[in-house]
Image (spheres, coloured by chain):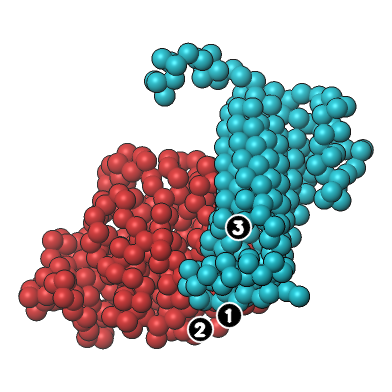
Amino acid sequence: MCGIAGRILGAPGRVGNDLVELMDAQEHRGADSTGFAVYGAPRDTGYVLRGMGFDKAGLDADMAGFRDILKAHGSDWLEEPTFVTSEAGHYCMRGVISDPADLARWVADADEMTDRFEVQSCGRSLEIIKDTGSSQDVAEKHGVRDLIGSHGLGHARLATESSVLPNASHPFWARPFADVAIVHNGQITDYFTWRAKLERQGYRFLTGNDSELIAVWVSDQMKAGLTMQQALKKSITSIDGVFTYMIANTDGIGFAKDQFAMKPIVAIEQGGELAAATEEQAVRRVFADEAEVTNYDGPSLTGIWGVGNRRMAA
Amino acid sequence: MTVTVDVGQRPIREVHQDLKEAYTSGEPIRVINTLSRHNLGGGMPPGIDITFEGSVGDYCGGLNTGAKVSIERNAGWALGEGMSRGLITVGGYAGMSCGAAMTGGTIHVKGDAGPRCGVAMKDGNIVVEGKIGYQSGFMAHRGRIIALGGAGASCADALWEGEVWVAGPVESLGVDVNVVEPTAEEVAEVDEILEPLGLKDTSRDWRKMISGQRLWYFESRDASAWLMI
């Protein structure tokens, strides 16, 4: 039982604040960890990075090694990294880099550092902020309420399939696909089968979390030529388990729901805005009680909500 | 005179303390500012007439023992779970598992109901004016689900002695379902349930679904075989 949420604003604004509210209302669904994916003003060039190091004592050495890898790929910091350290010993990083010559190759090399430091999001617009603790704790620690953007995702985690670690928190970035993030409520029962197939294609997974797999699975299908809507539909019959997930890119948010209708999702769409969540009482934190809510309660459902008042495809 | 209880973002424990006091007044109760909050009105006693203004969240009216409950808009999951007596009316939509494991009373949903409506119900009636969702009636032991607007896929899956009555299109049947022609007496019984709700209409073309009793456990009625489950 986890809680997930998505939010699209009519115009860029304090989407971080709304995501915190959506997750605070669903804290009872899982307070192991909380995370947010925020889509800020898209850059024309350069990538915003969010990352996590596992030992703050090694921060300087980690960053020196990380910069060496950047330079080896023709990239460097456009904005020097900033850090939030934790009593638990890990630290979180934000910075902006210039475009590497080949993003996927740079990600693969940067992933060689994952025993010490991992990149948790990379995009022109996407920033993933996640940590152990409640939404209020994570929001306060990382200044999430003040994050400005057009849309985003939120997740409250009740760990079932992998450890309670800061880096096993959601959302997950679909590495190495820039600007793609996922939140998921459920369990994938053929995780290892799909993971082996995707690893044979060269993808790398940093956790044992099944949600990380869905993000890459959908992105890989889109890379192969499917639209997001087609990939979402295909996931329902291709991936085993009970699940509802939301996946986002710079264009909007899509969702898919398994064949058994076990994991809820409700949404309010009003005036070009969207609030979607596992529970109705959460979306009512954002919209007034009078707003009409849609319960996507049935099995095998998919949909896409577009940013900028583009109507969803059902 | 009506007693008003305001929910807002107050702790539900506090709201329930106010509701308990309101129950003792004997007056109709109006609950406002519900904000789709969960667990509202659990275990309500007999003789209460309570209206929830707006939408409620999950488990509203659970374990109802005889109250008359009205929800003006939508209800979340497991509306009236485990209720034994009373009437719950929903003006709009009822989420998944409406009436789960209820043992008596009536739930009346004016809109649609979500998946697994009446799952494992043990008695009572669920009347849905719209459509019932995926796998409604799943493992219903007794009681009736009556859907006037149709049913989703896998309808009446793995029924025991419960019945699913549908006057409208059925997307697909679940496993081990027999669709039978109801007798005039049985239709009259259903009309008796519908009449006080203002829904009696003798022109309906009913499909009554009951268990086919072909699943393995219907062949294993001795105790030793049941221990294998």
Which residue in the protein does label 1 denote?
A10
Looking at the rendered structure, the kind of residue marked 3 is Met
Where residue A244 appears, x then y in whole percent? 48, 53
Numbered mark located on residue B87 in the image: none
Supply the letter of whichever chain is cyan.
B
- Calculate the distance from the C-alpha at mark 1 to the C-alpha at mark 2: 7 Å
Q: Which chain is red?
A: A
Amino acid type, residue under disc 2 in the picture: Pro
- Circle 1 — which element? strand
Q: Chain of mark 1?
A: A
State the separation of the CA atoms marked 3 and 1.
Answer: 42 Å
What crowding class fits label 1: few (fewer than 14 Cα within 10 Å), some (14-19), or many (20 or more)?
Answer: some
Q: Is residue A87 above or below residue A102?
A: below
What residue did someone put label 2 on? Answer: A12
Q: Is there a contact, CB below 8 Å, between mark 1 and mark 2? A: no
At label 1, which amino acid type do we have? Answer: Gly
Give the residue drawn at x 43%, y 40%: A240
Task: Specify the quadrant of the image occupied by residue B214.
Answer: top right
